[in-house]
Image (cartoon, rainbow, N blue to C red):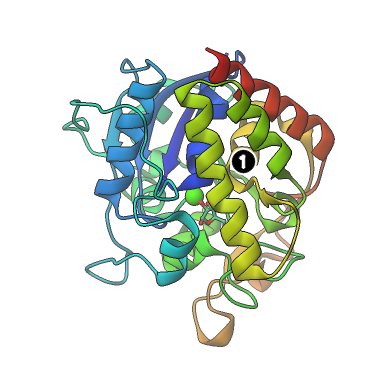
Amino acid sequence: PRKIILDLDTGIDDTLALSYVLASPEAELIGITGTYGNVVVEQGVANDLNLLAMYGRDDIPVFKGIDHPSTTDSFSVPADSEIFHGANGTGNIEIPAHSDRKAQEESSVDFIIESVRRYPKEELAIVPTGALTTIAAALEKAPDIVDKIRIVLMGGSLTQPGNVGPFAEANINQDPEAANKVFATTADITMVGLDVTTQVQMSREDTESLRGTGTAIGRFLADMTDYYINITEQEEGVFLGGCNLHDPLAAAVAIDPSLVTTFATNLMVETEGPQRARTIGDPNRLTDKTKNTKVALSVDAERFTSQFMERLMSLATG
Ligand code: BDR
Ligand code: CA
């Protein structure tokens, strides 16, 4: 199986991504590193531990990452994130399990560095689904891992408008400077951004199926996702009859890259002015022979969403 490290800011779609990975026989989740974004790090890590307890997977270690952007000394959850994910990150629905476990002593930064040194990149993928601060710090602290790491991140957009501004996607927007540092390295990056994540949805029929299992897990996943569907309709005024599966798609691409087609390029993140946080081609690296970022531009939505629901249903039915 492919080893996966999820770097989560555990909100609703992060929870769905974690669930999907646990239900994927091709994947082995070797650790969760907690970042900030939808929630503060402490809340995200608490959610991770409780979710793992809910799934009976207390064997998986959880690490705490950097808790604030690289350019400020503190972080508070943006109003938008709190609206979309609820104050607790899971749509104000309580996770039906409580863990007494604590996060590991070791930091996320060191866990990522050690794991990348240990496993070849064909075997391990790092999947960031929140702010990129911890990933940037790991690459900076251990430059030797740059050419060994495989990153499949949820964030950014090349062809679609942003979701927290005309150009800005939420995860990149949490720490544009850190994201820019990550893209500027020669690391092997696959960007699963709004270009493709807005093409994959979970519907109210899907949440009904989960609820229909009658299990605590099924009800939790259904109630939490209904919150996300409702808030998306209210706030964005788009009636998809569903919600986007941003983070689950990134996790799925890490496990099975054939779900998307990609375009190789060198990206930068704008850090100034009204286009701050925009992911865009780097004009200084246009003629470089090696293009380190593969941007996902189309997705086999049907194959992904049906497999996603099948796997969630298997978790819910136990
Ligand atoms: C991303 O922002 C967060 O709110 C979601 O969890 C996802 O990672 C979507 O832009
Ligand atoms: Ca996320």
Q: Is mark 1 within 8 Å of ligand 1?
A: yes
Q: Is residue 138 left or right of residue 129?
A: left
Residue 72 percent coordinates (x, y) = 27, 72
> Which is more toward the observer, 143 or 200?
200
Residue ID for mark 1:
250
Q: Residue furthest toward the bottom?
A: 273
- Please indicate whether residue 210 sits to the left or right of residue 22 in the image: right
Give the answer, above or below, for where 97 lies relative to 236: above
Q: Dot 1: within a 10 Å radius of its alpha carbon, few (fewer than 14), some, or many (20 or more) residues?
A: many
- In the picture shown, does residue 99 fall above or below 43? above
Where does the N terminus fall, quadrant-wise? Answer: top right
Q: Position of residue 4 (x, y in %)?
A: 50, 27
Residue displayed at 49% across by 55% down: 182
Give the residue displayed 73% in from the left and 65% down from the top: 238
State which quadrant residue 20 falls in. Answer: top right
Residue at point 42%, 20% (across, down)? 55
Q: Position of residue 264 (x, y in %)?
A: 75, 50
